[in-house]
Amino acid sequence: MDCKQAQDLMSAHVDGELDAATALQMERHIAGCAACGAALAQQLELRGAIAQHATRHTAPAHLKHRIRTALEAERPRPRAMKPWPWAWINLAIAGASTAAFAVTLALYLGQPSNGERLEQDLVASHFRSLMPDHLADVASTDQHTVKPWFAGKLDFSPPVVDLATQDFPLVGGRLDYLNQRAVAALVYKHRKHIINLYLWPEPAARDSAPQASSHQGFQLLRWRDRGMEFSAVSDMNGQELMQFSHLLQAKLDANPPQ
Amino acid sequence: MGKYLDDDKTAQFEALAMPHIDAAYNLARWLTRDPHAADDLVQDAYLRAFRFLDSFRGGDARAWLLTIVRNTYYTALRDGQHEKGDVSFEEDEHGAADVDGSDSRSGGDPARIAAGRDLDRSVNQALDQLPRAFREVLVMKEMDDLSYKQIAQVVDIPIGTVMSRLARARKLLLSLLTRDQAGERDGL
């Protein structure tokens, strides 16, 4: 070890921070080197001067008191700054999502299906037809007047039969718009009751037996026959309406349309 | 229940931190060179330590507290506080404070009292004049007898840097002291 190395390590040597081997080398070098011996003495003297003369400040008594007071003031804060109750927040979010889903589902289920909407339209149309001067565009009890009237107004020829002998006289005919198409509306009368019979072709659909339903106090009867959709609406009771459909169907079967 | 936990935490903190308040204050005082600033610094640091008590993973409580004192000081320094600690007249304060200390140390001999007072003032002044980075490691080594490893932890530098920084600090302090003594001799 030379003097340069020894002097560089002197500070650490005085602090006792050198490893044993290096410390031994230092001691050997210093023992044989006056300059480094003097440097060591100087370092020790400096340590002594600091230890003896530098002020070691001690905390004033009021400081501890101040800190304790500040800690007291600090104490409510961890409670005030409580961590967010994530469990409850998650639960609330889950609840809100479920509720939102339920509302969506309810709205979706509440949506009237196509069939339901059509039935509502049928009832609305029937109701409208009962208003003054809305019932018939062609007022005639003669099926041979009513049927030709539709020619050129519709892209199909509705079967028109008169049931006057069965107490369901034909009153007239009318154009209407339902199910996104122009349809034929035939108006029959049974005592004081008006029956609207809506007709439009459904070529792809199979024949089906009459299905009854009721909306807002009106009776509906719907069936399919030979590619034609029949929808009868009336304020008559369901049985009479069913009777009407049977009579009509029987007449149509007897005189099938060309 | 919360109150018991708080009481618990306060008691735990008291036991952990209060025994080292002198070391904390001494470092604060040598960093700020101002008694009021040192008061504020230690208080800030202790409150911070209390808040971060959970982050103390056992081990050297004194080094942990000194680290917080030091970090609090440098944070405040960066934010522009404690600048007033560098005013020059505070050295009188050291001088005044030192009189009491040296009286008790050096018996009743007026000459020794005077000599001791001079030396106290010289050493304190020389330490004050050291750049902060040297001053803090020297204070921790000489006054708190922290190991290089502990100083490295507090200052967050490698042990080798602690070693070289201390060596340079001592060299600088020596030159300040010899210049001071030489100046006084010239003055007389």
Image (cartoon, rainbow, N blue to C red):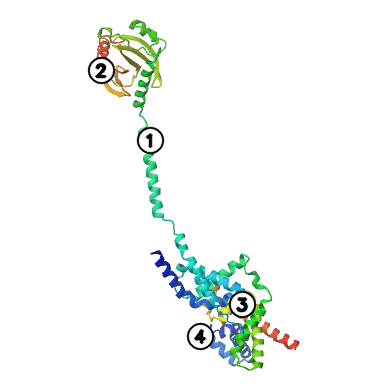
Which mark sits nearer the N-terminus, 1 or 2? 1
- Check disc 2 and give the amino acid type: Met
Badge 3: residue crowd in 10 Å (few <14, some 14–19, many ≥20)? many
Q: Pointer 2: residues within 10 angstroms few (<14), some, or many (20+)?
A: many
Residue A139, given in percent of the width and then of the height, sits at: 37, 8
| Up-down relation of residue B8 to residue A109 (above or below) | below
Tell me whether marks 3 and 1 sit on the same chain: no
Query: Mark 2 sits on what residue?
Result: A242
Tell which of A183 and A79 is nearer to you. Answer: A79
Counting every numbered tag in the picture gives 4
Question: Can you identify the residue that label 1 sits on?
Answer: A107
Query: Are discs 4 and 2 both within one chain?
Result: yes
Camera-side mark, 2 or 3: 2
Q: Secondary structure at mark 1?
A: helix
* Vertical arrangement, residue B117 with respect to residue A148, above or below: below
- The quadrant holding residue A107 is top left
